[in-house]
Image: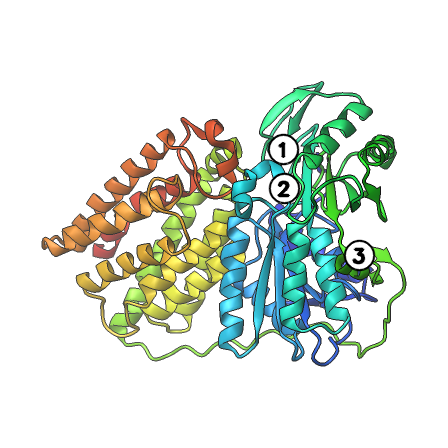
Amino acid sequence: MTRLWNDPADFADEMIDGFVAANRRYVRRVSGGVARSTKTPDGEVALVIGGGSGHYPAFGGLVGPGLAHGAAMGNLFASPSTQQVLSVAKASENGGGVLLSYGNYAGDVLNFDAAQEQLREAGIDCRTVAVTDDVSSAPVAEKHKRRGIAGDLSVFRIAGAAAARGDSLDEVERLAAHANERTRSFGVAFTGCTLPGAPEPLFEVEPGRMAIGLGIHGEPGLRDADIPSADGLAELLVERLLDELPDGVDSARGARAVPILNGLGSLKYEEMFVVYRRIAQLLEAAGVEAVDPHVGEYCTSFDMAGTSLTLLWLDDELERLWETGADSPAYRRGSVDHSGDVIAEDEADEAAEEIGRADEAGRAVAAVVARAFDIACATIDANVDELGRLDQIAGDGDHGIGMQRGVHAARDAAHDAVSRGAGGATTLARGADAWSDRAGGTSGAIWGAILTAVAAHIDDEGEPDRDALAAGLSAASARVLTFGATPGDKTLVDALTPLAERFADRIAAGDAIGAAWCDAADAATAAAKATADMLPQMGRARTHHEKSLGTPDPGAHSLALIAQALITLNDRKKA
């Protein structure tokens, strides 16, 4: 359990502030996370890593010479927002382009990909390598769907070493991808983890049992088993990893590999040393030469008790890079050059964007938008615990918290825009940006996209007509579909698609906006309820198919809740 926090909503920000205060030799605070305290050498590729907080030393603890140039740090177990990734990348880049690298989770993919697109639009060359080392999360035929866990370290170290050597962006990207292809990890957990302020763990394991194939965001394991002896656990970990050799490794006998025994937060080092003793024996018996063994905490899951074993299968070029020095707040190997121009922390607030012209009608629409966010806030606040419970069954339990962070930020941004005389389009767009930035994760990216698409179909002057609203909602649905989910995958899409389609149909039939919305909200509610009978095909719940049967998708359910609550907006508007 966690014991020390102030306001749980502020935990991640306060943690980053304290981390920077303790490590100014290495890092400076920038909007969205941290960057190196020294300027990136001219023309050097900037390695920007990141993910949710709660995994220390990943990700901020791995920023320093020979490793990353910056880390985008999201809220606890939530991916950083697009804005956070973009900000850290711009603070780290210095003419050599940017390589983004992170664990392969839906929210991270959405937000890092969006940041990559914006960097390229700004004239900065950017590439991405997502880490996919967790063998338990997908079969080898679908290894592109696998999660990234402690194998992050091997990919980051190879990429950082290549960048420090002066390699081109093409070469750094190639080597990072090569390291990822030759990295495999497998883990177990004995307890779940508890987020600050939460009354209970995200999942529980019966005494004397362990969860096999855990995720690092509090996702439960794929199956449970009795806790074996330390030697028995070592045998389970090694056997699973030797059972799947990467391409290019024809036989374990004669191969060289870096073993990384990673603690997940509460397992004692002494216990891990007992386990590693047997791992070393098993690798030697299999003919594998262990190179530079690592035993410690490299990617944790807050206070989870558990461990994972990673093997990076070396070849000549990977081994040369692995021998390169690295020095960061939490990881040190060899010696590095710390020279460079020190950069002051980024403490300057960005100037508030100017509010465009809006007429009286547009400002009235803005007020309605702000009231809509008020209603959405009240709805999520009333259901936050239930949304977390639904998400905890097959996910990581943070959907309610993430929605709450996002909708509150959107409400505050909308009211600020109204107070400055904004029209409807600007007010909605500001809310969209704030939701995406503050919530982070998959839901933040999706809700930001939904609201941005609708905002693009209305103006700051005059009232939007019925057809424009229908077109905006249809565009929102189409935009979210480009993220990869389709109806039937058990995601928010299962409620959003019928909402948009029914609203457009009723508007085309001549219904008033209020009546059309009522019908559309009912369609979304029915569709969200129907997701209880579906098996998830996307996101973190995908690896826990059967556990989610009988439970509606949290994202679809929260969208339907908000859609139903907004029915009252039409009555309030009339009043």
Q: Tell me if I can see residue 513 in this picture.
A: yes
Say which element carries label 1.
loop
Q: Nearer the viewer, mark 2 or mark 3?
A: 3
Figure quadrant of the N terminus: top right
- Verify CB contact (< 8 Å) between mark 1 and mark 2: yes
Q: Label 3 sits on what residue type?
A: Glu
- Residue indicated by mark 1: 213
Which residue does the image show at 51% across and 32% down from the upper left?
A: 544
CA gap, disc 2 and disc 3:
22 Å
Residues 291 and 455: in front is: 291
Name the outermost residue toward the right. Answer: 335
- As rendered, which of 390 and 404 lies closer to the eye? 390
Q: Position of residue 126 (x, y in %)?
A: 57, 70
Image position, residue 188 (x, y; %) = 69, 31
Q: Is residue 338 above or below residue 439?
A: below
Amino acid marked by disc 2: Asp
Residue 193's spot in the image, x, y percent?
Answer: 66, 35
Q: Is residue 340 left or right of residue 51?
A: right
Q: Residue furthest left?
A: 510
Q: Is residue 542 left or right of residue 308?
A: left
Q: Looking at this view, is 290 or 231 the one in front?
A: 290
- Residue drawn at x 78%, y 74% is 38
Task: Identify the residue position indicated by label 2 in the image.
Answer: 134
Q: Quadrant of residue 263?
A: top right
Amino acid at dot 1: Gly
* CB under 8 Å between discs 2 and 3: no
User: In the figure, 234 relative to 323: above or below?
Assistant: above
- Residue on which the image places disc 3: 319
Mark in the foreground, 3 or 1: 3
Quarter of the picture containing the C terminus is: bottom left
Mark 2 or mark 3: which comes first in sequence? 2
Badge 2 density bin: few <14, some 14–19, many ≥20, Cα 10 Å? many
